[in-house]
Amino acid sequence: MELTTVWFALIAVLWTGYFVLEGFDFGVGVLLPFVARDESDRRLVVASIGPVWDGNEVWLLVAGGATFAAFPEWYATLFSGFYLPLFLILLALIARGIALEYRNKSDSTRGWDRTFFWGSLAPAFLWGVAFANIVHGVPLNAAHEFTGNLFTLLNPYALLGGAATLTLFTFHGAVFLALRTQGELRATAIRLGRQIGLLALLIGGVFLLLTQLDKGKPLTWPIAAIAAVGITGALIALGRDRDGWAFAANAVAIIAITATLFANLWPNVMPALDPANSLTVDNASSTPYTLSVMTWVAAIFTPIVLLYQGWTYWVFRKRLTSTTEAVNP
């Protein structure tokens, strides 16, 4: 297998890990105003992701760095053409991080909670917009430069993709809260989760169907079906108080959706409306020597990172209660 294909697959895995882990962080932030009745509940909601949210963002940093090193042409076209949406995502992530760090150090938390909410909602929506455009294709010239504008990216299909990721991540957050909390807070998360899960199934199903009809390959149809089965299974498990199974099922759905998008994208990395101008794994990649060195580095350090993050989740696996001391995120 060529190293360009290997690194395309590795980048897909990194984005998948980011969406699975950071997805419930986003969902928890979006749900904060709706599940918390008082400051005690709000502290528990924030504490549920306190020990892990910053570690989850490492997946984004590594995915961006891997894209820059393995496919510099892709990175350059993506970050120049999608500059404003990606800048807004960066601002939202910075604001969210500041809110999580400072809410417990302030006498008034209302402003930080609103920042946490919007800093979670914006990326959850905009990542869907960005990836929908990447898969569908954007206007590129012969030099692989983006020739559209912001309104080019805000097309109906991309907005539907944003709505799909927003509802899916919010559902993921509801399932995570059900898994990590007890009592009335957990009951509220389950109730909202059932409603949002149905919405995610509907919107995500329409988005995947349109994607398959436009770009679908024979292999990706069953993968897309797994996504629908995963969300359905999560709804069923959540209704039967099987929180762990619900979280696993929805994680499978996110994995399947991301796999569907990347499989439909390959061998392109940035398809153009004019196929002759598309960026592919071949014309966007670094030299074979660079990819070879990167492969050795990834083989050594990736298992270490995975073991450390797995240990973190194991240490903070217990449910939180109203008597639990809030973890300072």
Image: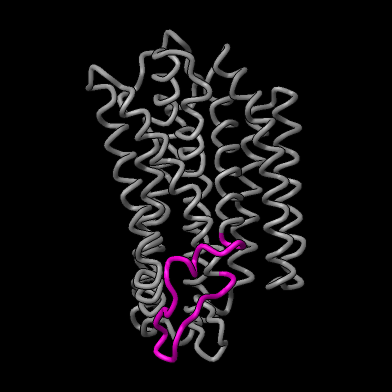
Residue, x 57% and y 11% (percent of image)?
A: 183
- Write down the region rendered in magenta: 135-158
Image quarter of the N terminus:
bottom right
Q: Residue 100 location, x and y as percent?
A: 32, 32
Residue 16 seen in the figure? yes
Q: Could you tell me what secondary structure mostly forms the magenta stretch?
A: loop
Image quarter of the C terminus:
top left
Residue, x 49% and y 47% (percent of image)?
A: 124
For the residue pair 121 and 268, the one nearer the viewer reads as 121
How many marks overall?
Answer: 0
18 shown above or below 231: below
Residue 295 seen in the figure? no
Q: Residue 10 location, x and y as percent?
A: 49, 65
173 shown above or below 139: above
Of all residues, the one furthest to the top in this rendering is 323
Question: Which quarter of the picture shows residue 211?
Answer: bottom right
For the residue pair 71 and 300, the one nearer the viewer reads as 71
Q: Residue 86 location, x and y as percent?
A: 37, 59
